[in-house]
Image (cartoon, grey):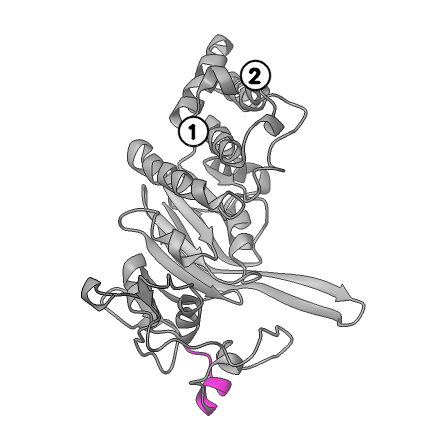
Amino acid sequence: MIEARGITRSYRTHGAFTGARTVHALRGVDFTLPEGGAICFIGESGCGKTTLGKILTGIETFDGGELTVDGVPLSALRPGRRAPYFRRIQMIHQDPYSALNPTRTIEQILEAPLRMRARETGASTASVRTRAAELLDLVGLEPEGVLPKYPHQLSGGQRQRVVIARALTVDPEVLIADEAVSMIDVSLRLGILGLLRDLRTRLGISLVFITHDVATARYVGDGAELHVIYRGEVVEHGPVDEVIQAPVHPYTQCLLSAIPVMRGLEEPGPDRFAPLAPLDERVRTNGCLFAPRCPFADDRCAEQRPALEASGDSSRAACFHPAPRRVVGVEIEASAV
């Protein structure tokens, strides 16, 4: 089980036109990922969701807060002693085209971590190729046809399945899927999403799904929780279907309002709306971070920072004026067509 409490991460930047400034990628993120569970993080580009994924895999460090894995607070451990915990958490990268070494065959790509794993566990290295074939079969690829090939000889969907197989070589307990289907042909996305859902069921692996596409979050599986991030802060969270069908935070409602509607089959939700202005992270506010773009903001929103409070049966939102609005597309009845 993974618990995050108040995770923060900041970067110091210096631009030719903006000068030196501090970018707050994460501003106190809390969540709990149970064994075999699933959490989705959604938000627009630059909201901090990828930074959070990198922190969970040890690629990035966190400035404040606490990250606990199976009851062990990682901040109390030296960097070298954190490695065994991070090894149990593997990332599926966004770009399958750059995630694989183009000079190595798929067999070499999979056997490298498998041989390292065999030396650590004392297992026979003779079974490495057999295990590589088993992993390819597990992710829906034909081993004999794929093992001798180089990455450029595979399609985007096949490469992403190889990336997933490579993540499974160390027997992880958690997979971090960072925009795992955003660079794959639309016709192949459902297959990858189905594979991730199947791995949860068959292997009991926990899943952290990072995306900007609300629709794909619904395919992660039963019991998944959705966390909506805005400028490094969770503004709403709850069960996936509850947040999508009955969002109460204006930012979540803006995200859902941006989902295209299938003409002839759906009609737009009657309460759809867009932000008042584009995102400008240079704008500073003591209150709600979304207030400068929110059509429902008042003086209190500009002066005070709202806390996450109960907003539904199982959901919470950080808003002074939470209100359910019908923004998702509504299916047209057959008699009305």
Residue 53 in percent (x, y) is at 51, 49
Would you place residue 316 above or below residue 164 in this image?
below
Q: Is residue 86 above or below residue 32?
A: above
Q: Is residue 19 rendered to the left or right of residue 52?
A: right
**x, y percentage for residue 120?**
51, 20
Q: Which residues are magenta?
A: 299-307
**Residue 328: x and y, percent?**
34, 67
Residue 285, given in percent of the width and then of the height, sits at: 56, 81
Is 332 part of what is drawn in magenta?
Answer: no
Q: Which mark is residue 148?
A: 2
Residue 6 circle label: none
Quadrant position of the C terminus in the picture: bottom left
User: Which residue bears the numbered disc 1?
Assistant: 171
Residue sticking out furthest to the right: 16
For this orientation, the residue located farthest to the top is 126
Q: Crowdedness of circle 2 by 10 Å Cα count: few (<14), some, many (20+)?
A: some
Report the number of numbered marks: 2
Question: In the image, is 162 to the left or to the right of 283?
Answer: left
Residue 227 visible in rendering = yes
Q: Residue at x 56, y 60 (%)?
A: 45
| Label 1 Cα crowd, 10 Å radius (few <14 / some 14-19 / many 20+) | some
The alpha-carbon separation of the residues under discs 2 and 1 comes to 23 Å
Marks 2 & 1, CB-CB < 8 Å contact: no
Amino acid carrying label 1: it is Asp
Pick the residue in front: 158 or 200: 158
Q: Amino acid at mark 2?
A: Pro
Q: Residue furthest bottom?
A: 299
